[in-house]
């Protein structure tokens, strides 16, 4: 290194004593400066290389050993928990590299608190080949065929295979998580079984998606949501109803089974346990109390029906199974002998695999999360947490729930960098929902910049079939963009708060199994403003029975939503006041330059009377307009002034929309402007079985704004 140091003293002595001309002095100084600059660059580059190499790398492998591990490739850790503790102890930037294989979390996950942070980042990478299992895996070769006549005679006469069993105690399983009551908000589902060689279904009747219609209701039961409506002296029972299917007589002596279905409001899925079945009276006596009891005959809807679940007596279809939670036995019906290498995963974990508290600069990528009773990732007070290229499947609940750290302490320039992001992930076959992000300051209208982008969601309501959104935004300033949502029983997106943006997503076959719901939903917050639903493609979200369903639902007085440049194809029903876009009572919602193709109705508003509006927001729910008249809100949204005043006009707008085989808005108070246009296709359109984006482009690609919307490519974009 000494050869690189210029002798500054000798150079200046030469300049001062040599008597050389000025140009020689200039040249000498120039050479000196160049040497100094090169030395500085050398040391700067060396410092940069040192900083880049300062990140510690910790290797983890299923074949590792925590007791002797150093984190080197030849001495990897066996568990993520041990590697995380080593990284935290170092206090430096770190990367945990997960080798290909399966990592089990049957009892506990990894607690991450206050590391990583603003001065030390952490990456956890799995390369797409590391799998986290929230339970136990048992090879299928351990199955034995059940031949005991006492068991076999309990099964239906017609069966699709042979009955096999496992004694779970022999594989270290000490308990199974019980099935919970629905609706539930504890985020935990009961233990389930998953088969590597095909789909499993907890034994039920009827099979598939078929249901049993509710018969005559003899006693609607005690209402827990509105106890004041119960009659004086009424017994606190779940209810009594006549059954409409004689199959119930098979379940008189059955234990630990539940009825899952829609028992009253058409938007609420629930579950009840049975007190007894009376075959003589053909009645079911329900033990579990429901929020609104069991529906009466006059209120019954097409969707009021149920399935009986967790019945040994109904194991008859290939892939149906039953868990004896008392004796820890597993029974399954299989048509074919399991192939070599097949296995069963049993979910046991009731805690997150990754529990994040006050962390910053965490990236989790390329990990598969499966077979857990609850969500694998939960975060509180997180900043710049990134979940990418991960798969979440076969989970009892949802996948990710992260709240951002308070943003009040950040400058405006810093706010855009405080976001938590879930991107390029697949979330499928979950028990109740997908990804939930919250953050920002509602009081101060400061954004979180949380983002859900380029993700695929499907089959996200195996158990919690209602109010289990595939994506959920809370707070202020979140984004859901370029995602693909499909095959969902209830709503796909739920959002609450202000200034969220839902753009360039694709929704197909969503929200078709309930009554009174929309593919996207928000409500009961007239002071929320600035939400935007833009450039999305909705298709085949039309409910098949006589229920009220829509594409965009702005409920119970909410307003200030801009719904622009979306394409709605065969979405929503014209049952009651519903349509592709449905506004319930709110105002200042704008439908602008939307396209409606083969929809039963384009838009509708159901207005409230002035008296009902004022009664609801002044007397019953004053908290619902808490910030509407504050200086911060009124400066940005002056139309919110006196929002609770029932005498103020409540209009919504339709601006320059396009229609094909779809009616104009109906009901409520609409301002129509900018022209409403009937679209002319490029060629005659007959019956279109499925409105894909390709079909829309084929017939209407020369129509504005169809071309502009499709050019933005709704749905998942390729990775850059």
Image (cartoon, rainbow, N blue to C red):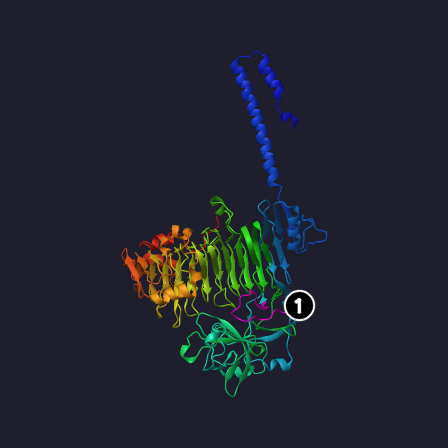
The picture places residue 58, in percent across and down from the top left corner, at 65, 49
Based on the displayed image, in which of its 4 quarters is residue 159 positioned?
bottom right
Circle 1 — which element? loop
Residue at x-position 35% and y-position 70%:
576
Residue placed under numbered mark 1 in the picture: 173
Q: Which residue is more in the foreground, 457 or 478?
A: 478
Q: Is residue 189 magenta?
A: yes
The picture places residue 62, in percent across and down from the top left corner, at 66, 56
The picture places residue 100, in percent across and down from the top left corner, at 62, 54
Q: Residues within 10 Å of mark 1 (few under 14, many from 20)?
A: some
Residue at x-position 65% and y-position 68%:
141
Q: Which residue is more in the foreground, 396 or 627?
A: 627
Q: Quadrant of the N terminus?
A: top right
Residue 210 visible in the picture: no
Q: Give the magenta-colored segment's residue range.
A: 176-193
Compared across the picture, whether 615 is left or right of 346 comes to left
Q: Is residue 247 magenta?
A: no
Compared across the picture, whether 325 is left or right of 241 comes to right
Based on the displayed image, in which of its 4 quarters is residue 180 positioned?
bottom right
Residue 40 visible in the picture: yes
Farthest residue, direction right = 68
């Amino acid at each position: 290194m000494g050869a690189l140091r210029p002798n500054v003293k000798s150079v200046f002595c030469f300049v001062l004593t040599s008597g050389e001309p000025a140009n020689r002095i200039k040249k000498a100084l120039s050479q000196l400066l160049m040497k100094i600059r090169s030395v500085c660059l050398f040391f700067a580059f060396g410092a940069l290389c040192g900083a880049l190499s300062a990140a510690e790398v910790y290797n983890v492998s299923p074949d590792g050993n925590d007791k002797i591990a150093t984190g080197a490739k030849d001495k990897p850790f066996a568990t993520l928990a041990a590697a995380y503790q080593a990284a935290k102890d170092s206090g430096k930037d770190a990367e945990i590299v997960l080798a290909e294989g399966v990592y089990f979390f049957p009892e506990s996950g990894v607690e991450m608190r206050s590391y990583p942070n603003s001065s030390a980042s952490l990456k956890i990478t799995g390369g797409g080949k590391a799998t986290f299992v929230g339970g136990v895996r048992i090879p299928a070769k351990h199955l034995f065929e059940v031949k005991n006549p006492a068991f076999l005679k309990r099964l239906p006469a017609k069966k699709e295979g042979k009955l096999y069993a496992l004694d779970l105690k022999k594989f270290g399983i000490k308990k199974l998580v019980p099935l919970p009551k629905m609706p539930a908000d504890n985020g935990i589902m009961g233990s389930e079984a998953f088969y590597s060689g095909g789909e499993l279904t907890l034994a039920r009747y009827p099979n598939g998606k078929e249901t049993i219609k509710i018969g005559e209701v003899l006693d609607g039961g005690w209402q827990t949501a509105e106890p004041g409506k119960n009659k004086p002296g009424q017994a606190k029972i779940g209810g009594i109803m006549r059954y409409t299917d004689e199959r119930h007589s098979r379940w008189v002596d059955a234990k630990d089974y539940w009825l899952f279905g829609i028992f009253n409001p058409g938007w609420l899925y629930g579950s009840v346990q049975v007190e007894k079945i009376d075959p003589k009276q053909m009645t079911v006596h329900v033990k579990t109390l429901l929020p609104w009891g069991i529906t009466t005959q006059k209120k019954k809807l097409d969707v009021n029906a149920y399935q009986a679940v967790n019945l040994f007596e109904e194991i008859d279809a290939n892939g149906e199974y039953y868990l004896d939670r008392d004796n820890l036995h597993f029974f399954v019906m299989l048509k074919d002998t399991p192939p070599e290498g097949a296995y069963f995963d049993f979910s046991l974990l009731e805690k997150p695999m990754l529990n994040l508290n006050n962390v910053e600069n965490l990236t989790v990528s390329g990990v598969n999360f499966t077979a857990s009773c609850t969500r694998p990732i939960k975060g509180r007070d997180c900043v710049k947490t990134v979940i990418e290229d991960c798969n979440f499947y076969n989970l009892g609940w949802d996948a990710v729930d992260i709240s951002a750290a308070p943003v009040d302490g950040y400058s405006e320039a810093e706010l855009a960098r405080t976001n938590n992001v879930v991107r390029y992930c697949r979330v499928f076959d979950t028990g109740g929902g997908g990804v939930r992000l919250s953050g920002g300051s509602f009081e101060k209208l400061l954004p979180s910049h949380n983002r859900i982008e380029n993700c695929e969601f499907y089959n996200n309501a195996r158990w919690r079939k209602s109010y289990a959104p595939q994506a959920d935004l809370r707070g202020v300033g979140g984004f859901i963009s370029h995602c693909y949502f499909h095959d969902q029983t209830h709503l796909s997106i739920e959002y609450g708060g202000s200034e969220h943006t839902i753009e360039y997503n694709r929704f197909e076959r969503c929200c078709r199994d309930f009554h009174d719901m929309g593919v996207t939903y928000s409500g009961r917050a007239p002071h929320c403003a600035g939400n935007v639903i833009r450039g999305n493609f909705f298709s085949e979200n039309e409910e098949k029975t006589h229920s009220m369903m829509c594409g965009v639902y702005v409920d119970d007085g909410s307003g200030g939503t801009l719904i622009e440049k979306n394409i709605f194809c065969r979405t929503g029903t014209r049952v009651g006041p519903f349509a592709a876009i449905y506004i319930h009572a709110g105002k200042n919602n704008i439908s602008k330059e939307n396209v409606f193709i083969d929809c039963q109705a384009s838009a509708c508003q159901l207005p409230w009377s002035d008296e009902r509006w004022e009664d609801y927001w002044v007397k019953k729910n004053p908290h619902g307009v808490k910030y509407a008249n504050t200086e911060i809100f009124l400066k940005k949204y002056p139309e919110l002034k006196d929002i609770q005043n029932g005498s103020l006009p409540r209009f919504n707008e339709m601006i320059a929309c396009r229609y094909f085989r779809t009616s104009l808005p109906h009901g409520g108070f609409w301002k129509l402007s900018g022209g409403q246009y009937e679209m002319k296709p490029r060629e005659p359109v007959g019956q279109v079985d499925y409105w894909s984006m390709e079909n829309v482009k084929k017939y209407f690609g020369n129509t504005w704004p169809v071309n502009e919307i499709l050019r933005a490519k709704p749905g998942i974009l390729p990775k850059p």
